[in-house]
Image (cartoon, rainbow, N blue to C red):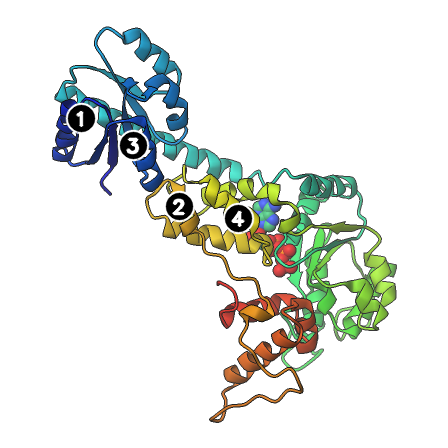
Amino acid sequence: MIPLILVIDDDITLNRLMVGQLNRMGYAAAGVHSWTEGQNYLQQHDPHLVLLDCQLPDARGRDVLPHLVADYPVILITAFGSVKEAVVSMQAGAAEYLLKPVNMDELQLVIRRVLDAHSMKREFLYLKEQVQKRKSFMVGSSAALKEVEHMIDAVAPSMMTVLIQGESGVGKELVARELHERSQVANHGYVALDCCTMQESLFESELFGHEKGAFTGADRQKQGLIESAEGGTLFLDEIGEITPAIQAKLLRVLETGRFRRVGGTRDLTANVRIVAATNRDLLAMSREGEFRADLFYRLNAFTIYVPPLRERKDDITALVEHFINNHDFSRRVNKHLTDKALDKLRAYPWPGNIRELKNMVERAIILSGDAAKIQPEHITLSPEISPATMPSSSRKGISLDFDELPTLEDLERNYLNLLLDRYEGHRGKVARALGISERNVYRLLKKYDYMEA
Ligand SMILES: Nc1ncnc2c1ncn2[C@@H]1O[C@H](COP(=O)(O)OP(=O)(O)OP(=O)(O)O)[C@@H](O)[C@H]1O
């Protein structure tokens, strides 16, 4: 990558001389002659370094420095005799200064030095961020997130069962992890189980374990996750997806602390703290008979609600920074959003919440290439799912028309389309109609390009 250097100097001859010299030195250089032209240039380009004349026709170097130094290393060019001015400017953040008439050898040396120092600084910030990464779990400082933190602090030290509620992608799993880290059992195991990924029979033996011979293929005794998490935390994600039989067994664990392995005849003691999460309305489900009311009330003893991102847009900047700095393939640590890019993010409703924001940042890092600034055009957002953005399909019945015999995928796509149409893009309702979790609907939406992957 060839470093781009901008020269802002109204001395036409010197400007041309420096640009020519810089190009011969292997840099890509551009010259402008006033602060106004400089500002216009910076709106379109993203140089690695700026050479700035102290005295421009429309501005003084020291006055414009604060606008530049946050984004670029700046070398000040100052007339012989105004060294005092140069010192003041260095204090205001200029990386170096050069005296007129500019000696081209000195120019080469100073530029190399400033570019090297700048890239070392970036590397240092990157590594510092990597170290801090281990400490920080939940990023954001909005009032809504503070409230969540407050709830975590309040309940973490007890062994109370906790239910975490919130839309898909808001960070419920992160809250569960925080609860564990801030609990008295933090040095014991933390075991997470996604309840929507397994068949009932497998799920039961995964959770409670099984005895030898309990079913075909059970050729030896196996401990379940409840035992693996002994003394620690068992996190049950997507709790709204468990079947009535498992609901009954889980209720027993919560009420008596006892359970049995599949095929077992003796009770074992469950010494774990249970934390569960869901994006479904368990109260409504219990009213409709889909979820046991007694289990709901047990889980609901202490509920932490994690608000969607659209209700805590103040967290967007910090989250974006966090995802940029923690991105494995991002070596450019000083990438940041322009104000316009941030406005674009704040105006968007984030149906996929923080997961969607994270994916967007990953795309923006790639699309912005070597540029230090992420501009609005680097940000690609999915159109919100609404009837207007969806292909039309029949609103009545489930008749699906195909010219030829459809594949299973054709059926899946068309049926999903029909349900989205019928339920006006409401993912929860589509999930219920399909009998799958909202997270799986989310996966289908991505698979069939309703949302960006
Ligand atoms: N406050 C936060 N700070 C940093 N990263 C976050 C934050 N909240 C969420 N994330 C990240 O967003 C992604 C989605 O979070 P998570 O899986 O915890 O959501 P969820 O609510 O459990 O989603 P689902 O209901 O689909 O399981 C993860 O990569 C997570 O690390």
The answer to whether any part of residue 233 appears in the image is: yes
Q: In the image, what residue occupies the spot 51% across and 82% down? A: 409
Can you tell which mark lies on residue 37? 3
Looking at the rendered image, the disc whose residue lies closer to the viewer, 2 or 4, is: 4
Q: What residue is pinned by disc 4?
A: 345
Can you tell which mark lies on residue 367? none
Looking at the rendered image, the disc whose residue lies closer to the viewer, 4 or 1, is: 1
Whether pointer 3 and pointer 2 mark residues with C-beta atoms closer than 8 Å, the reply is: no
Q: Is residue 109 left or right of residue 283?
A: left
Residue 243 picture quarter: bottom right
Callout 1: helix, strand or loop?
Answer: helix
Q: Earlier in the sequence, mark 2 or mark 4?
A: 2
Estimate the spatial distance between the alpha carbons at disc 3 and disc 2, rounded to whole Å. 31 Å
Estimate the spatial distance between the alpha carbons at disc 4 and disc 3, rounded to whole Å. 29 Å
Estimate the spatial distance between the alpha carbons at disc 1 and disc 3, rounded to whole Å. 14 Å
Residue 116 image point, x, y percent: 28, 29
